[in-house]
Every structure is written in structure tokens, then in C-alpha cells.
Image (tube, rainbow, N blue to C red):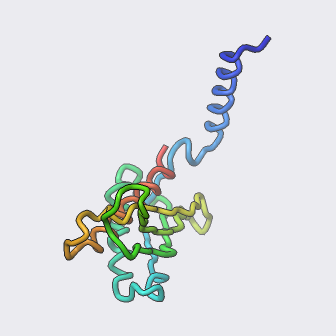
Amino acid sequence: MTTRRVFLTGSAALAAGGLASLPALAQGIAIGAIRVDARRLGPQGWGENAPRIARALEQELARQLGPLRRRGGPTLHVTVLGLWLASAAGGGSPGEGTTNDNMDTVAEVIDRGRVLFSREIRSTLPSSSGGAWYRPDVDQRRVAALLENNAQWIGRYLAP
């Protein structure tokens, strides 16, 4: 007779064995250069801020992915598909018409023309993530929060 404990132990062992067979993610992916393309943001209304957003995301990725960097390793290419700030920032209680900011990217690790890893990532944060809505730099802080969150997700998918 199969007991619940035997079933759960066997299921856990099977799951662990299945995860170990994913070579890229089980060992982590070492990366060399980091490239961010935010050109799609221009037509979405970000205009001359698009290159600044690309540089800021590139810097945030370099900061967060430092342990994964290897000289001469494959290149991490991140394409920013979109960045949307909700029209209202802050205020309200949770569940009371809470609004979110979003950022969509595609992260790819490419080595000699071969894609080693590809993942679409959507970062969603409450519009209050930038802090006090009445501060003059609230939108910059909201964008910075989205960039940091997106870089964290990319790091989670690349790290062991």
C-alpha cells in the first residue's frame, strides 16, 4: 500500500531529478557583455528618455548580475518591449482601485549566434512603488523601481 508520505517523498525525488536535467538553469548561465535595446519606447511616447532608460537598465543589470559575469562569456541581450506608468500614483487602500505600473522585456543570452536562453518578463508594481506621489521626481522613481524589479527577475532566471 502506498502511503501519503511515500508518495510525497517519491514525487519530490522525481521533481528534483527533473530539475537537475535542466543544464543551463541548474548551473546558472555565465554572461559577458550586457546590451539593452529600448528603441521601441520612443514611439510609445518615451522619446529621448528611451536611451536613458536603456542605460539605466544596463547599469542595474551589471550591478545585480555581477557574480554571473565572466570575461568572454555569452552576451545578455534585453529588449524593452514596453513601459507603462499608471495615470495615478499612490493613494487608496489595497484592493481599492489599486493601479499598477508595468514593464515588458525579452531577455536572451546569445553565444556565437546561438540562443542559449530566452525569456519574456513582465514586471508589475503598484504605482505607489515610487514613493510619495507629490514629490516632483515620482515618475523617475517609479521607472527606477520597475527597472530594478525587471533586473531582479532576469537574475532569478539566469542564476542557479
Q: Residue furthest top?
A: 1
On screen, residue 160 above or below 140: above
Between residues 71 and 120, which one lies in front from this camera angle? 120
Between residues 73 and 6, which one lies in front from this camera angle? 6
Q: Residue at x 52, y 62 (%)?
A: 121
**Residue 116 visible here:** yes
Where residue 117 sits, quadrant-wise, is: bottom right
Residue 61, given in percent of the width and then of the height, sits at: 37, 61
Where residue 64 sits, quadrant-wise, is: bottom left
Where residue 132 sits, quadrant-wise, is: bottom left
Q: Residue furthest left?
A: 135
Between residues 21 and 126, which one lies in front from this camera angle? 126
Q: Residue at x 41, y 60 (%)?
A: 96
For the N terminus, the image quarter is: top right
**Residue 70 visible here:** no
Q: Residue at x 46, y 62 (%)?
A: 123
All told, the count of numbered labels is: 0
Q: Is residue 132 left or right of residue 60?
A: left
Q: Residue at x 69, y 29 (%)?
A: 14
Q: Is residue 61 left or right of residue 40?
A: left
On screen, residue 76 above or below 80: above
Residue 38, given in percent of the width and then of the height, sits at: 44, 78
Q: Is residue 151 left or right of residue 13?
A: left
Residue 77, given in percent of the width and then of the height, sits at: 49, 68
